[in-house]
Image (cartoon, rainbow, N blue to C red):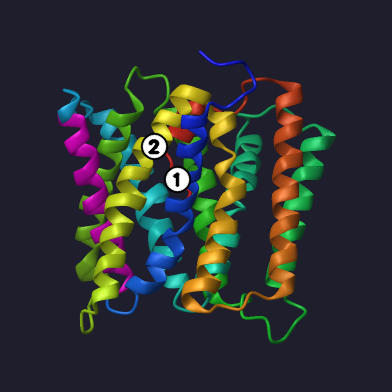
Amino acid sequence: MHTKGTVRRSSLLRLIALALIWGSSFLWIKLGLRSFSPAWIVAIRLALGAAVLTAVLRATRQRLPTGRVVWLHLGVAALFANVVPFALFAYGERQVDSAIAGMLNATTPLWTILVATAVGQERRPSPGKLAGIVVGFAGTLVIFSPWHHTSDVMSWGGLACLAAAACYGFTFVYMKHFLAGRGLSPLRLAAGQLSAATALAFAALPLLGAGTSEIRPEALVAVGVLGAMGTGLAYLINYRLITDEGASATSLVTYLLPIVAVALGAAVLGEVIPLNALAGTLIVLAGVALARHSIRRTTQRRISTSADAVGFPS
């Protein structure tokens, strides 16, 4: 046991590992685009992620979920938590830097709170929560800076990345309502969700006209790491953290992701991040912190840990 309010060293190391894995996803996507189309990146990363979780499922003698209704909801979650946002980030990074994609991903908690409030999962928003949402989206506006005619973020690629974060926010709320509380372990739900997402992604390949160019070693490695680690191993770390420390402590990864994405984008790809994007990201994170602090003050359990356990931040 450990003292309430503290995070044990092993959990801290897992938190750092999770931030590094998920924060690096945007770099791997950028490298993967050197050889693979966005559609192929999505399909391969999902297949590898599903393989990892299915192997762990069998090793722990668990089975995939059963029941038509459960699989219907898993299919919806797979579409909007995996296939669509993964594709949006991959298409978006054709136009914007990997660091920008990571920064825009930081708006996911804001979308989650906004959607949960809109559909009644959250009660009437407190002034603090409203202020946090307003501040957060004001930061998003600063990142885009539409008043700058030379803004690289103000493009279809930037909007695609923002839409991907909004998809995550929607599906966290959806999964809380339709999948949480069914007596299924997060691992079973996640393995089922990724299996459904893999089937959907490969079914969509002919429709998207997916193709590849000359296979470059760095692109092949990037997609492999993105799938096995960023979409498989990271889930396992996430589950363990939520089990050991709870969703609140695990959510600290939200603040570390953009730092990792920016650092790797600059160090590996030589990306130059505009000052307005850096400032906007800090404002977004401040808004997230304000909104979450308000939620914790008004109730201790407003955001479901189960929803956090079966979602993807990147």
In the picture, measured across the screen, residue 208 lies left or right of residue 247, that is left
Badge 2 amino acid: Ile
Image point 47% across, 23% down: which residue? 244
Label 1: state its secondary structure: helix
* Tags 1 and 2 touching, CB below 8 Å: yes
Q: Position of residue 52 (x, y in %)?
A: 22, 43
Write down the quadrant of residue 100 in the picture: bottom right
SS assignment for the magenta stretch, majority: helix
In the picture, measured across the screen, residue 23 lies left or right of residue 45, that is right
In the picture, measured across the screen, residue 136 lies left or right of residue 78, that is right
Q: Earlier in the sequence, mark 1 or mark 2?
A: 1
Q: Which residue is outermost to the top? A: 1
On screen, 277 above or below 78?
below
Residue denoted by label 1 = 17
State yes or no: residue 235 in magenta.
Answer: no
Q: Position of residue 18 (x, y in %)?
A: 45, 45
Image point 75% across, 82% down: which residue? 148
Label 2: state its secondary structure: helix
The answer, for residue 209, to whether it is visible in the render is: no
Q: How many marks?
A: 2
Badge 1 amino acid: Ala
Residue 237 numbered mark, or none: 2
Q: Which residue is outermost to the bottom? A: 150
Rounded to the nearest angstrom, the CA distance separating label 1 from label 2 is 8 Å
Q: What residue range appears in magenta?
A: 37-58
